[in-house]
Image (cartoon, grey):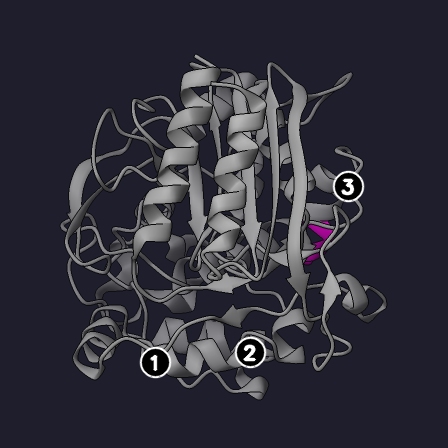
């Protein structure tokens, strides 16, 4: 397998027509070996025009944001300001309503807190009203006893972690991430939302296919407790880019995302700066949930650490490709993916403007690309 073959598979992926634009960055042993942008995108400030994507185009990471937010929390664990088994209510006392006093930070990080989502309308005013969201989460009832089941927390967990970080540090989540990680990594973006000065190089999300049949939509809405049609409609609204959504609205390039995961692969170090200890990175990426069926993700078995999805040996739903037991990373709605693989000394980010709502042959092409990359770097 060669780099030219990897590029050929990416060309094949683009030719499906399901990826209006995408950006890829791959580091092997710390060096960038593949870095490309493909396709065209609609910028946020001119949504009726199309531009060629380049390496400076910014993309929403969606749920890859969860892993980055979790590392901010791990930094506070390292400093002794928090412990992973602290009840959330120790830091947000009003959260203890309706039997939620036993929910710990560990439960939230491993999607087992029992509050995977709560019914809400994703209006602009709600997205921009942080205090209202926290108040709603505090008033919500848990669906099951914490730790008993795994059910992917789409947005709720991120808000709780973000509120804990802000209360403990007295600093806004955006400023804390900037000071502790992004400035030290020399990143221009990769924070929550993005300034209007960069709207011209930020890609709109594109729904490239009809919605799934109504029964599938209804099933998804029931499992996730969110309106899929509404979620797809709101993704390009200004409120999403102006607010802080800890589990879903970090925005950056593939190279910036890859650089963050490379820092984790390098045991918390970037150049001459130790951002977080090697021991804490190990704790963050160590297995906590062993392939337990996830009740939000259609009962598929998932492995979780304290903030990351973990790879598998050989499985049709292994999101990082075949034989990636040591890999850790995250998916982002619906085809973004970033991961690090210590066994291969590999860090990867694949970001796209495409929003595909159900699997088809392009999934197999992307998986073939991952497997080819893993083989080349083994």
User: Where is residue 6 drawn, in percent x and y?
Assistant: 52, 30
Please name the residue shown 77% across and 50% down the image: 56
At 40% across and 73% down in the image, what residue appears?
209
First reached walking from the N terminus: tag 3 or tag 2: 2
Q: Quadrant of residue 312?
A: top left
Which residue sits at x=58%, y=42%? 72
Q: Is residue 14 above or below residue 275?
A: below
Label 1 crowd bin: few (<14), some (14–19), many (20+), radius 10 Å? some
Which image quarter: residue 49? bottom right
Q: Position of residue 369 (x, y in %)?
A: 43, 34
Look at discs 1 and 2 and give the one toward the viewer: 1
Q: Quadrant of the C terminus?
A: top left
Q: CA distance from mark 3 to mark 1?
A: 34 Å
Q: Position of residue 88 (x, y in %)?
A: 39, 54
Along the line of sight, the residue nearer the viewer: 20 or 247: 20
- Report which residue position mark 1 lands on: 227
**Which is more N-terminal, label 2 or label 1?**
2
In the rendered image, residue 167, in percent from the top left (x then y), is placed at: 58, 57
Looking at the rendered structure, the secondary structure element under dot 3 is: loop
Q: CA distance from mark 1 to mark 2?
A: 15 Å
Read off the residue under disc 2: 127
Q: Which residue is mark 3?
A: 187
Which residue occupies 27% across, 69% down? Answer: 224
Left or right: residue 214 versus residue 65 is left
In the image, taking residue 169 as reference, residue 2 lies left or right, namely left
Based on the displayed image, in which of its 4 quarters is residue 160 positioned?
A: bottom left
The vertical placement of 6 against 157, above or below, is above
| Magenta-drawn segment | 172-176
* Magenta stretch encompasses residue 175: yes
The answer to whether mark 3 and mark 2 are in CB contact below 8 A is no
Q: Is residue 171 visible?
A: no
How dense is the environment of label 3, judged by Cα within 10 Å: few (below 14), some, or many (20 and up)?
some
């Amino acid at each position: 397998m060669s780099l030219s073959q990897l590029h050929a598979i990416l060309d094949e992926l683009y030719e499906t027509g399901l990826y209006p634009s995408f950006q890829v960055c791959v580091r092997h042993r710390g060096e960038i070996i593949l870095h490309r942008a493909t396709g065209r995108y609609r910028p946020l400030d001119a949504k009726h025009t199309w531009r060629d994507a380049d390496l400076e185009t910014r993309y929403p990471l969606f749920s890859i944001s969860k892993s980055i937010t979790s590392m901010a929390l791990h930094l506070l664990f390292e400093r002794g300001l928090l412990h992973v088994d602290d009840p959330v209510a120790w830091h947000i006392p009003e959260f203890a309503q309706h039997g939620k006093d036993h929910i710990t930070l560990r439960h939230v990080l491993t999607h087992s807190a029992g509050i995977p989502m709560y019914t809400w309308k994703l209006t602009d005013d709600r997205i921009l009203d942080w205090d209202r969201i926290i108040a709603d989460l505090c008033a919500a009832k848990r669906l099951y006893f914490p730790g008993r089941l795994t059910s992917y927390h789409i947005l709720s967990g991120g808000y709780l972690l973000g509120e804990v970080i802000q209360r403990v540090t007295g600093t806004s989540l955006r400023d804390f991430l900037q000071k502790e990680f992004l400035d030290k990594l020399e990143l221009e973006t990769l924070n929550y939302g993005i300034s209007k000065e960069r709207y011209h190089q930020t890609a709109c999300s594109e729904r490239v296919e009809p919605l799934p049949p109504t029964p599938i939509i209804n099933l998804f809405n029931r499992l996730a407790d969110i309106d899929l049609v509404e979620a797809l409609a709101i993704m390009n609204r200004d409120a999403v880019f102006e607010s802080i959504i800890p589990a879903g609205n970090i925005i950056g390039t593939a190279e910036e995302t890859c650089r963050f995961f490379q820092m984790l692969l390098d045991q918390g170090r970037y150049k001459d700066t130790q951002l977080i200890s090697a021991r804490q990175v190990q704790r963050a990426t160590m297995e906590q949930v062993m392939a337990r069926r996830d009740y939000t993700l259609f009962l598929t078995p998932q492995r979780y650490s304290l903030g990351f999805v973990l790879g598998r040996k050989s499985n049709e739903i292994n999101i990082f490709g075949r034989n990636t037991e040591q890999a850790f990373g995250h998916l982002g709605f619906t085809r973004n993916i970033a991961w690090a693989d210590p066994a291969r000394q590999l860090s990867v980010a694949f970001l796209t403007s495409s929003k595909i709502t159900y699997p088809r042959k392009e999934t197999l092409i992307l998986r073939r690309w991952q497997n080819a990359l893993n083989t080349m770097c083994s």
